[in-house]
Image (cartoon, grey):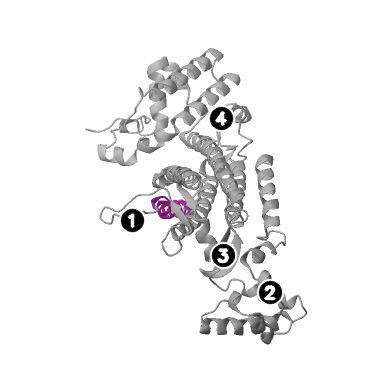
Amino acid sequence: MMTKQTWSQRFESALHPTIARFNASINFDIELIEYDLTGSQAHAQMLAHCGIISLEEGDILVTGLEQIRSEYQQGEFNPGVEAEDVHFAVERRLVEIVGDVGKKLHTARSRNDQVGTDTRLYLRDQIQQIKSQLRQFQHVLVGIAQQHIETLIPGYTHLQRAQPLSLAHHLLAYFHMAQRDWERLGDVQSRVNISPLGCGALAGTTFPIDRHYTANLLQFEQVYANSLDGVSDRDFAIEFCCSASIIMVHLSRFSEEIILWSSEEFGFVTLKDSCATGSSIMPQKKNPDVPELVRGKTGRVFGHLQALLVIMKGLPLAYNKDLQEDKEGLFDSVNTVKACLEAMTILLQEGLEFRTHRLAEAVTQDFANATDVADYLAARGVPFREAYNLVGKVVKTCIATGKLLKDLSIQEWKQLHPAFAEDIYEAISPRSVVACRNSYGGTGFAQVEQALLAAQELMKRY
């Protein structure tokens, strides 16, 4: 059976049912329905304000659209593929409710500027929700960091032991990543918050509309100054997907560390039962599913960014049906980022415990204090590069004899260089190694305490 559509009399036959299904977007753009209703209400109010329709007709349209909102929220309005998209679905139902007045809603508007408006309203709302989630994630990081200012953890470069760190310092690195994410989303939000409503299909309209009136009703900060750009721009969606990808990079990097830390080889954290699963065959296993899933889901968000870039790269102005493909990836990116932020926040807050005894042991079983030996000599007048080479030889000898630097006797130290004294042992203790790194932004305890205060102030200020 052929499907009849809301087209002009230019078409002599209905759409083939397979093509109708292929063409339809209602199964995913129903996500925009409440934003479509809000945008349509503003459009109706503007038409009445400008005298294009009567004030009474404007009120009828706004009331009818609100009824559709109520029906949708109560599960009574569930349009199918015959509606093609959310815009036609709403218009068809509006005409059923209010009669022929409903047919006036689309005056001075195209689906092109309508979907652009809906998508921006949706994304503006979702960005605000994601920013709130990032703040909660940051609050949890700061809360844990406050408990572990003087807890030490091995720091790594090239995944090799490098220098010991304050655990709080390590956690605050992710706080600052999240802060950049929060600020980056704010930048994107300013370019999302531009109204294309009134651009029409591509060239504007002959009706005496007031685009700034609808922009004010919908709390847009600006309106597009060029109608072609207004209906075809998806830069804001690309920027969001890029920002979402960077958020996922940060979450995935943290996930990788948690996965390593929870392994037997590291043993730095214990996963609690509420945030881990077991094996179907190996009863001893406790698997870090949350960080593994976050790490895995990162790829799909990257993919949506790439897909959107590929969609846009070859499109001539103005609107093309290819742009229907922007929504599923955008919606999934939003949902994936929100789900991963929520899961990681719960994991940090409730699902893992740092094994402080194991961490304390770990920072005493390596040569991560070698740089501090070189610094010790440099502070006593030995050129750093000379000190560096000397310590390299000492480490080589220690490895050959199965010793650590802390195991050398004072006589052995003095044989290496007369500048060494009894205070070398305190200078290379893990706690001293961390505490003395008090340069701005360093891991020294005093610096970390200041960094925590600054982080709390930052969250209050923005």
Measure the C-alpha gap from mark 4 to mark 1: 69 Å
Of pointers 2 and 3, the one earlier in the residue sequence? 3
What residue occupies the far right of the structure in this picture? 381
In screen coordinates, is 388 left or right of 232?
right
Main secondary structure of the magenta stretch: helix
The one nearer the camera, 179 or 86, is 179
* Residue marked by disc 1: 285
Q: Is 220 drawn above or below residue 46 in the view shown?
A: below
Mark 2 vs 3: CB contact within 8 A: no
- Residue that numbered label 2 is attached to: 424
The crowding category of the residue bearing disc 3, from other C-alpha atoms within 10 Å (few below 14, some 14 to 19, many at least 20), is: some
| Residue marked by disc 3 | 155
Residue 378 lies within the magenta run: no
Q: Amino acid at mark 1?
A: Lys
> Is residue 148 shown above or below 55?
below
SS class, disc 2: helix
The answer to whether residue 310 is visible is no
Total labels drawn = 4
Left or right, 189 with reference to 116: right
Quote the CA–CA distance across marks 1 and 3: 27 Å
Give the magenta range.
Answer: 289-309
Mark 2 or 1: in front is 2
Q: CA distance from mark 2 to mark 3?
A: 22 Å
Question: Which sits earlier in the primary sequence, circle 4 or circle 2?
Answer: 4
Identify the disc placed on residue 206.
4
